[in-house]
Amino acid sequence: MSQIIIIRLLKISIVLGLCLIVTGHALIVSSYFTRQHGISGIITAAACIAIGVLLSLPTKIYLTILLMEAEKRYLKAHSHKPK
């Protein structure tokens, strides 16, 4: 796969992870959901948050590493060494 496709998939993973985190938080905050489903509802909301974190954090680390490598290449190409 090309780097552009990988980055696009990682960005989709970040957005999906953030959506799951927000959904899990909304489910926990919602008193109707927790009263209706009890402990299993809290576990479901916590699972949404956990899966969201699993999807979003590693991809952010990978994208940060890619940006650092790009910056290193840029600085190497544009560095002027005075004599």
Image (cartoon, rainbow, N blue to C red):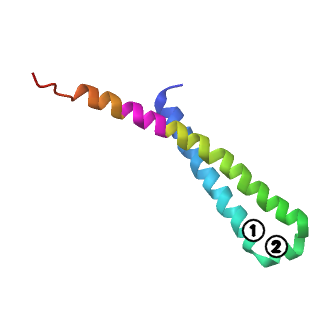
Magenta segment boundaries in residue numbering: 64-70
Measured as percent of width and height from the top left, residue 14 is found at 58, 48
Say which residue appears at 46% left-offset and 33% top-offset.
4
Q: Secondary structure at mark 1?
A: helix
Residue 69 on image: x %, y %: 40, 30
* Dot 1 amino acid type: Leu
Identify the residue at horizontal 72%, vertical 62% (top origin).
24
Q: How would you classify the magenta stretch by its main secondary structure?
A: helix
Q: Which residue is mark 1?
A: 27
Q: Is residue 4 above or below residue 28?
A: above
Which residue is at the far front? 83
Q: Residue at x 16, y 27 (%)?
A: 80
Answer yes or no: do the residues labelled 2 and 1 have beta carbons within 8 Å? yes
Picture disc at residue 64 = none
Q: Above or below — where is 22 with respect to 30? A: above
Q: Position of residue 81 (x, y in %)?
A: 16, 25
Q: Is residue 45 left or right of residue 17?
A: right
The residue to which callout 2 is attached is 33
Quadrant including the N terminus: top right
